Amino acid sequence: MTSLFDAAVTASDAGEGRIAIKLRVNGQEREVSIDPRMTLLDYLRDVLHLTGTKKGCDHGQCGACTIHINGRRMNSCLALAAAHAGDEITTIEGLGTPGRLHPMQAAFLENDAYQCGYCTSGQIMSAVALLSEPCGASDDDVREFMSGNICRCGAYPNIIRAIQQVRRDQQKDAAPQPAGA
Amino acid sequence: MQTFDLVRASDRPAAIAAGAESATAQQGASVRFLAGGTTLIDLMKLGVERPERVVDINRLGLDEIRKAENGDLFVGATARNSDLAHHPLVRADYAALSQAILAGASTQLRNAATTAGNLLQRTRCMYFRDLASACNKRKPGSGCPAIAGANRMLAILGTSNACIANNPSDMAVAMLAYDAVVHVQGVAGGRQIPLADFYVLPGQRPDIETMLAPGELITHVTLPPPKTGERSVYLKLRDRASYEFALVSTAVAVTLADGKIANARFALGGVGARPWRVRKAEDVLRGSAPDERAFRNAADTCLDGARPQSHNGFKIELAKRCIVHAFKQVTS
Ligand SMILES: Cc1cc2nc3c(=O)[nH]c(=O)nc-3n(C[C@H](O)[C@H](O)[C@H](O)COP(=O)(O)OP(=O)(O)OC[C@H]3O[C@@H](n4cnc5c(N)ncnc54)[C@H](O)[C@@H]3O)c2cc1C
Ligand code: SF4
Ligand code: FES
Ligand code: FES
């Protein structure tokens, strides 16, 4: 059982010890040849120069590296890039642009939900995913669902405020409009 | 990280054949299956795991969660911890399992972590994770610095003079209380291992942790049908409210009849070399009134033989209170 990857490119084609695969990042497909040891986090930062995703602990303990894989949030430091061939990967850069912020990015700005900003992209990626998770309504519920993202600056109160604001706005948008409005 | 071949198994026999090339399925394995990767990649970065070949088993269709024809809950090996915890069947019939999973790790980790990977996660003993330290589990015969060192988090039950590490899984504790069975497939065929027999006590070989032989692939876990009228809960006590391993935890399931305990099953986490269940402690409860005295009795029996280390003696009383509190909660 040599190379069993979808791309069906053998290790020797890709260079000694490397694997050739296709990765989809922020809607763009790329053919890449990588060392099997490379994590998604290192691939995003060092190869694609998408440095919005941060490295805190490199061991699943802080959440700074949170990205979406097929719409679900995960820690990119504990994912091998080559094992995610064919998956849809979204980073903070794929969420919004400076001119067109995602509502969660806008809410973090508006609520001053950071100090140094190092944890912020991870916080936002988690917060956006949370919107479609079975999270209860209370601040405590949000705290529990956000516990995988550590903030050394302690911006937690404003992070919760930003998330709750976006959730309320969403509910308003989802509520039926009164007739004639 | 030591380099390795990464292969995606085309089917189960290919994965099993690849796995069987390793001399062991325990510490030091030269072939490892990759599921969620949240234990394996972590330990490969630390150099604690050094497989020469990593076999991706994520696309083998092992992720089903459903009710089996015989009424069992069928949980695929690569079903994600999040999907299992939020599954309607689990929430309705195995509440303590849902709660146990959600009390562990973080949403990001649970989205990646799988059933089999969770069962096979390794101890968080800091010496085990640090190549600069001796450790009988990582390097048999090198010694156990935890015995005279930092052992506050470690085990008080099932330990040996060679290793006092605890099993950190929350999910496994609930599964043990629910009488789970682990289904494995190997080169020589399949076998079913009750979770109660799946983990091996350390003795003089703490590097051997489970019954698994080289190549054996966990395909799924089954839980027997829920008992009529049974109520269950998972209680986890830890140093912070979330995203932290247990000091002590318990999964408790009780059936009452005519104001008496008709049946009780419970298991402990955080305190044992493996998830801990004592049948005698459950027998103590059968037929008695669901009151503090009975619960305390069961807790005493369950902790019988506990051996505290220099920094974790508090776990004995904490475990007993954890059991009593969980029973009160579920019977009130
Ligand atoms: C920061 C942090 C905090 C955590 N907190 C908690 C906590 O509070 N409570 C808790 O319970 N857990 C906790 N965990 C552990 C987490 O639950 C486990 O890492 C996870 O469940 C492992 O599953 P996985 O699929 O990622 O396993 P992997 O890392 O993919 O695999 C683990 C092991 O199992 C083997 N394996 C995987 N699948 C199979 C199979 N089908 N057959 C045979 N062998 C197989 C692999 O080869 C490997 O050796 C935490 C982890 C981290 C990093
Ligand atoms: S307790 Fe076990 S895992 Fe920890 S150092 Fe001792 S032998 Fe190693
Ligand atoms: S860098 Fe991935 S969780 Fe900390
Ligand atoms: S804003 Fe500084 S770590 Fe969160």
Image (tube, rainbow, N blue to C red):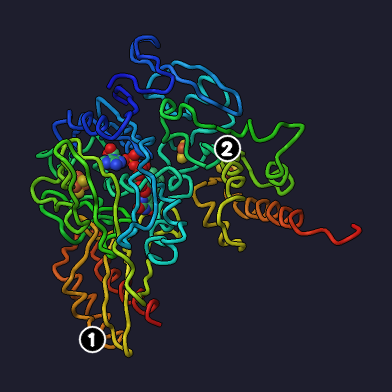
Q: How far across and down, in percent of the image, does residue A30 sit?
A: 54, 19
Q: CA distance from mark 1 to mark 2?
A: 57 Å
Q: Are there few (<14), some (14-19), or many (20+) residues within 10 Å of tag 1?
A: some
Res. B71 visible in picture? yes
Q: Label 1: chain?
A: B
* Residue B188 % position (x, y): 14, 38
Residue B155 placement, left or right of A140: left
Q: Quadrant of residue B325?
A: bottom left
Residue at x 32% of width, y 29% of height: B9
Establish whether ligand 1 lies closer than 8 Å to the Cβ of label 1. no
Secondary structure beneath label 2: loop
- Chain that bears disc 2: A
Kindly indicate whether the residue at mark 2 contacts the one at mark 1 (C-beta within 8 angstroms). Answer: no
- Horizontal placement of A56 versus B65: left or right? right
Residue found at x 88% / y 61%: A179
Q: Residue at x 27, y 80 (%)?
A: B295
Quadrant position of the N terminus of chain B in the picture: top left
Say if A16 sits above or below A124 in the image: above
Residue of label 2? A118
Q: Check mark 2 vs ligand 4: CB closer than 8 Å? yes or no.
A: yes
Q: Secondary structure at mark 1?
A: loop
- Label 1: which residue? B287
